[in-house]
Each structure stands twice: as structure tokens, then as C-alpha cells.
Image: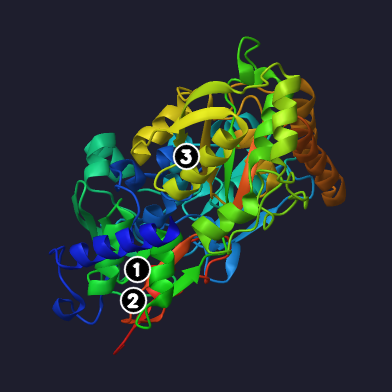
Amino acid sequence: MKKTYRMVLWLVAVALLAMPFGATAADRGPDELVFAFHVTISPAWFDPANTPAQITPYGILMTMHDAVVRPYPGERSGPALAESWTESEDGLTYEFKLRPNMTFHNGAPVTATDVAFSYQRYKGSGASVLKERVKRVEVVDEQTIRFHLHKPWPDFMTFYGTTATSAGFVVPKAYVEEVGEDGFKKHPIGAGPFKFVSHTPGVELVLEAFEGHWRKVSNIKKLTIKSVPDTDTRLAMLKKGETDYAIALSGLVAEEVKRDPNLKLVETRHASIFWIEFPEQWDEKSVWSDLRVRQAVNHALDRDAINDAACLGFCPPAGVIVPRVMDYALQTEPVPYDPEKAKQLLAEAGYPKGFDAGELVPIPPFFVVGEAVVNYLNAIGIRVKMRTMERAAFYAAWREKKLKGLFVTGAGASGNAATRVEAFIYSKGAYPTGGYDDIDELFLKQAAERDKSKREAILNRIQQLSKDRAMFAPIMDLRALIGVGPRVVEHQIHATPLHPFPAYEDIVLKGQ
């Protein structure tokens, strides 16, 4: 079977290499870079106001926009538009001092008024918890802004200053009010290292270096990010020199890159993870409300084999849905692979011959993981068929709670264990369809706890409870694999902690 699949892959790759996709390396200038995305680029990602608890939009946002405090090379969360900040002794006030003489791409100055405006219009993941805890925002002067909290909240800087949310990203108030929300998405203006040039829906986003960026002027003068959802097409483009990077490679395609002496396969080190969701576990009429059935799914998965097949061994099997690289993550072993135990649990739940579980949707484009999960579930008698969706449709269905039964999903936004609990475990978060009162109480308790060791103990307890109750079936921490072409001398993939995308402005190409 594996030999047959390899032959099919080889034939597809040969066919794709014969097809015209775009400009090759020889057709590009020495300062021009092409990056092949694994999904269709959404104009919603041009505006930080509605960013979900996912990492992919930040591959776009952090090109055009900058934040008060954010991750950048060498810093999980460091001074960006703000040159410094202070926290009051009582933990109730945070004051930020902006760098002098900064401008947006249109020449307008970056001011504290823009910071306040951007925070107030933010409606993305984490907005509710921020608005609940922030009492008011005070513009002291055009370079100084203060956030006043109702009570001490040790995670304010985590929610505001990492990719856990995009609440700290700053857009120009006057321009947004002039062109409107839709006009802003059509032609975004920010303060990031690259300026918007054009967007061809479903094809590409073109950017150029912003000469006035506070940190540095980019080595790359023209950056083109292409929408290439098909994995085989990304491989063919990389081999032909039509892209310098191809992200989210897996399985045999990743192996092909690894074997090619002209290419590099680089694993990322970000906070991403795959798991199975059981959105109907709180519905008493659903089969998924039975703990034993959810436990059976956990025992059905050979996580080591899934890692080898999809991730070439780079992705460690997971025991909880908080990636082990995050602060306060529970360092625990995954549920052991035991198909006989899984069948026994199903029999005890009243399903000795298994049951039909309908469709399983995997997060696009990680269909190799989805296929593996389907095969392991079928093997124990949980009969499912895989149904694929386009990425934007998948996320919309997840947020709107339209995905039923069980599905494979993932997340890669930064932060810590508390930000993951808030988004995916806390019943009032953006994604859960239900929750547990005791876990909710623990989440609220840790949010006010300023002692780090006590917070860690509470967050570890939440994660252990989620494991004991089989709220999820964690699969593996994702080390997304990126193919890098021969023009790239310094790829910068590991430059920004807990971030899978390279620092585009720091990439060095041959001849530079």
C-alpha cells in the first residue's frame, strides 16, 4: 500500500512539475520572496479586529500590522510600538509609553488615541474576557496610554501582548473611520514591516517593505504570499523555484522535500496541537455523552504511528490540549494505544458491535491526520467517513457550533495554559458547546491568583480534569513542517518563539 502511494505521489509530482504556476526564481529580483500558504488567504486577516484563537491569520497580520507589545525575533512578548511599560504595585494599572515619531504606512502618526481605538473595536477571540476585566482605557497624552483593571489579573499582558489575541495590534483611527470597515479590508493600512500593494482573491497577496518601520527596514523588498491549498501543488512549486517557502507539508510530500538535496525541510517549534473535539458530550441524547465512548476514542489512537505517518516523527504525542511548550502546561503522558481496551469500553457502553458515527471533518489541510484517525476509529467499530471542508468554512462552522459528532481540529495561537483553557475549555469561551461548573470556577480562581506556583497548580488541575473526563482526544503537538528553497540563506523559521512563521523582514536571500 505504501509503495503504491509513493508511486502515485511521484506521478502526481511529475505531472505538476510540467504545469505552469508562476514566475520562477530566475524571473524574480534578488530582494523578492514568494511564500506558499496552505490555505486561501482571507481578507478578514488584513484587520486585527476579529482574529480568532488560531495562528494562521498572524502569518498575514504581522506583516502589515504592529502591536503595542508582541512577539518578535528573540522575544515571546517584547516592546514593539511601546518602548516600555509598567505595572502598578497593586496590579490594577498598566501604563505604556509609545516610541516617538512612529508613523503608519500612510504617513499618519501612531498615537495613544489609535491604541485606544484599536482596543475598543477588537471583537476577536478573548475579547469578552478582556472587556470583563479592563475597567477603562485612559489616553494620558498622545504617547502614553493606561489600562485600568477592575481587579488584579496576572494574564493581562498574556492576552494583550502575545498572539493569544490581536487586541494589542494598532490601526489608524482616522483612516478606518474615513474608509469604513469594508474599505479597510480592501486596502489595509498598518504600522508593520510591510505595506499592502494588492490582493487577488484566491491567488495572492502582494506586499512591499515599509521604509519607516521602527525595528528595521526589511531585507525583502517585495513579499508575495500565495494561496495554494493543494499540498502537491506547493511541492511542485517549491521544486520548480516558483516559491521559496511551502508551509504545512506532511506525509510523503514532506519526505520528498527531505530527500531533495536542493531543499530543506524545517520543523517549527510553535505552540500548536491537534485534538478530537466531542461537541455533543453535554447532550444526554448523544452517544458522545457517555464517558466510556470518549475514552474508547482515546484508546483507539496510535499516536506514535500518526506522528510518523503525518509528521515524520517530529510531532510528540499529546496527553492534553495545551501544548507542552506553553507556560503552565500539564506535562502528562498521552492515553496509551489499546484497541482491545477501546472495544471493551464500547461494549460496556452498550455498543459491542460498534456504531455508525457519521462524518468526521478534519481541520484543513491536515487530511493525513484525518485519514489516520478515521482508520483507527473504524478499526474499533466506530464507523466514520471523512468529509473535507475549505479552511474558512471549517472555522466558521466551528465558531458557530455547527460541527456535530466528532471532528479533528487544532490551534496554534500563543499565550499560556490559561489562554487555551479560556478559548477551548471554559464554558463561556469562544468555541466550547458546554462545560463543567467546577472547571469554570477553577478558571476564574486562577485568573485572580498572582502567585505563579498556585496558578500553575490550578491550571494543571483543570487540564487533569479535562483528561479524566475525556473532554477531548488529544493527538499530538504539531511541529508544522516547512519546505525551504535554495535561494534562502537564513530562513528565520525559529526566530520568533512560539510562532511558526519566519520573521519575513529578517530573511536573507542569496546575493544579499
Callout 3 crowding tier (Cα within 10 Å): few <14, some 14–19, many ≥20: many
Q: Give, as a three-letter code, the residue at label 3.
A: Pro
Give whichever of 224, 242 is nearer the camera: 242
Q: Helix or strand or loop: what does disc 3 sit on?
A: loop
Circle 2/circle 1 CB separation < 8 Å: yes
* Res 491 → quadrant: bottom left
**Label 2 sits on residue:** 485
Q: Looking at the image, is mark 2 or mark 1 earlier in the sequence?
A: 1
Per the model, the C-alpha gap separating discs 3 and 1 is 24 Å
In the picture of the structure, the residue carrying the numbered disc 1 is: 245
Local packing at callout 1 (Cα closer than 10 Å; few below 14, some 14-19, many 20+) is many
Return the mark for residue 52.
Answer: 3
From the viewer's perspective, tell me whether residue 171 is left or right of residue 498. left
Q: Does 293 appear above or below 241?
A: above
Residue drawn at x 54%, y 61% as measured from the top left = 71
At a point 65% along the width and 43% down the height, the residue shown is 321
